[in-house]
Image (spheres, coloured by chain):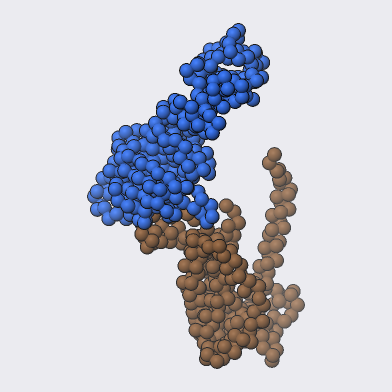
Amino acid sequence: MARTISSRQTTVATIAAWFLAFLMFFPILWIVILSFKTEGDAIGTPFHVLTSGWTTEAYSAVQERSDYPKHFMNSVIISLGSTFLGLLIAVPAAWAMAFVPGKRTKDVLMWMLSTKMLPPVGVLVPIYLIFRDWGLLDTLTGLTMVLMLINLPIIVWMLYTYFKEIPGEILEAARMDGASLKSEILYVLTPMAVPGIASTALLNIILAWNEAFWTLNLTAAKAAPLTAFIASYSSPEGLFYAKLSAASVMAIAPILVMGWFSQKQLVRGLTFGAVK
Amino acid sequence: MGQIILDQVTKSFGDVNVIPPLDLAIEDGEFTVFVGPSGCGKSTLLRLIAGLEDTTSGHIRIDGRDATELPPSKRGLAMVFQSYALYPHMTVRKNIAFPMKMAGVDKAEQKKRIDNAARALNLTDYLDRRPGQLSGGQRQRVAIGRAIVREPAAFLFDEPLSNLDAALRVGMRLEIGELHNRLKTTMIYVTHDQVEAMTMADKIVVLRAGVIEQVGSPLELYKKPRNVFVASFIGSPKMNLIEGATAAEHGATTIGVRPEHISVSPTEGMWKGRIGVAEHLGSDTFFHVHDTGLADMITIRAGGEIDLHHGDTVYLTPTPDKIHRFDQQGLRVA
């Protein structure tokens, strides 16, 4: 028998869902509100914050004090670069594991994922020393490499799950139809895999954009992305709520806009393989 | 041309020997059906011929040329898969054109062949749709269209009708039969359904555990099954197999009588029994008779008008010259 859901249950569930969604969105909303206040108003009670006047002076101050375009460009280079490099390595890897699996394929996948279980701080010192010795500290190259490497297991896993969904018989049909390996990949596999590759890329760009541990620890000024730009406003000289909020809004705005326009792809990416 | 010769072909997956040495000749233009229960190696055999699996040893010759080491794309064969295996991102037209595109056929010729195939398969109105917008039967026709336009040496069908509903299956069976009559190209067809095998084949290859049990025309297999396995596999409903004293009377370990070769009477006959289930199909009636002392159940095929029902006592008489005799090894006694 089908489960019946009363309209009261639906109403309760809807209210709960909206409440939860609001709870999750609240920090972002609050940051946006604070960013339009003076420093004095920003540290007041919530009531005071909501009733005081609005101003864009925090934004002007941030613009004056820091070089937003430079940080923004660094973030773009690091997140796009690490995603592109990661895909370059992960696509063939996932391809091989999905379509020509060996006895140890599952083990290799688990081993890759296990690196994500390691607390990053545990390898901070060795990586810092390697970066220092190789002259990679505070360089875009170094940062792109390290972000690519930390996200690589996720990229491989996502692509693997996606490729697994492509029925092998279609590839066999292409072979029977006279396709060489190159045409098989070019005309049959890639077009079918594009949605998967796209959502993987999107998720990875977001992860790389917001990554703060490595970007803060391995950069100083030259290669600092937007995460470092935000962090520079929570300084030991005291908290500047309004400026910190303004910087945060400026840092997350681009990725928020991108995420908004690619919602569909993103949800598909996050729920990979969840439903047949 | 499309003659295919298998010469001592074997296939093992790791330690498991799926196909022991096997010889088979398929002549040009023949409609050959590989039939057998699931897991008998019939699909593996087809995939070996297609080149989708590598042989462990032995040779496959297509039109006299050794094709054992050739990749699937170079064998000149076309395959229709059970899952249709259409390219979901291409329209029907592009799906059908794909093998020609791979072969470098010029555009005008491509168009001509696509139009011909579409007309023959009733797909003209669907050429610009994607596979996702088609029904199962239409998808299967697209898959066949994709195979036809290549003008292959032989068509390979891997259980192509299993995903269709019963009514559609009968229709497609006829279409494939007509296609063969028209093209006269070699076709190899894999199925577990002996009715498909009987109705379509010029030659049936009955397989069990990778071993060929018998090769022959449908009627040869029906009339002279080489062993008990073929006897019980071919024919519907299944042949009745009787062992023990009754078989010994006929000088055999097992005797077999087909349901259509036993007459039934409410008053007199050789064997007495009681009707369990009576299936009235209109044209025929199938009686499943118990308590005969011969086997658990004896199945009989009688006329549609016969007035006998569950629980009735009946007398059965086999047609003497239609009794199949098998020895201790299950082999036919001449």
Could you tell me which residue is drawn at 50 percent across and 73 percent down? A86
- Above-or-below relation of B125 to A97: above
Front-lying residue, B53 or B86: B53
Q: Colour of chain A?
A: brown
Could you tell me which residue is drawn at 56 percent across and 91 percent down? A132
Which chain does blue denote in the image? B
Q: Is residue B316 left or right of residue A93?
A: right
Front-lying residue, B257 or B8: B8
**Residue A154: percent from left, percent from top:** 57, 69
Residue B271 in sight: yes
Number of on-image labels:
0
- Above-or-below relation of B283 to A270: above
- Above-or-below relation of B76 to A51: above
**Residue B146: percent from left, percent from top:** 36, 46
**Residue B105: percent from left, percent from top:** 26, 53
- The quarter of the picture where the N terminus of chain B appears is top left
Could you tell me which residue is drawn at 53 percent across and 66 percent down? A200
Q: Quadrant of residue A236?
A: bottom right
**Residue A129: percent from left, percent from top:** 59, 89
Front-lying residue, A50 or B85: B85
Front-lying residue, B235 or A152: B235
Q: Quadrant of residue A24?
A: bottom right
Q: Is residue A233 left or right of residue B141?
A: right
- The extreme top residue here reads B267
Residue B149 in sight: no
Could you tell me which residue is drawn at 66 percent across and 67 percent down? A25
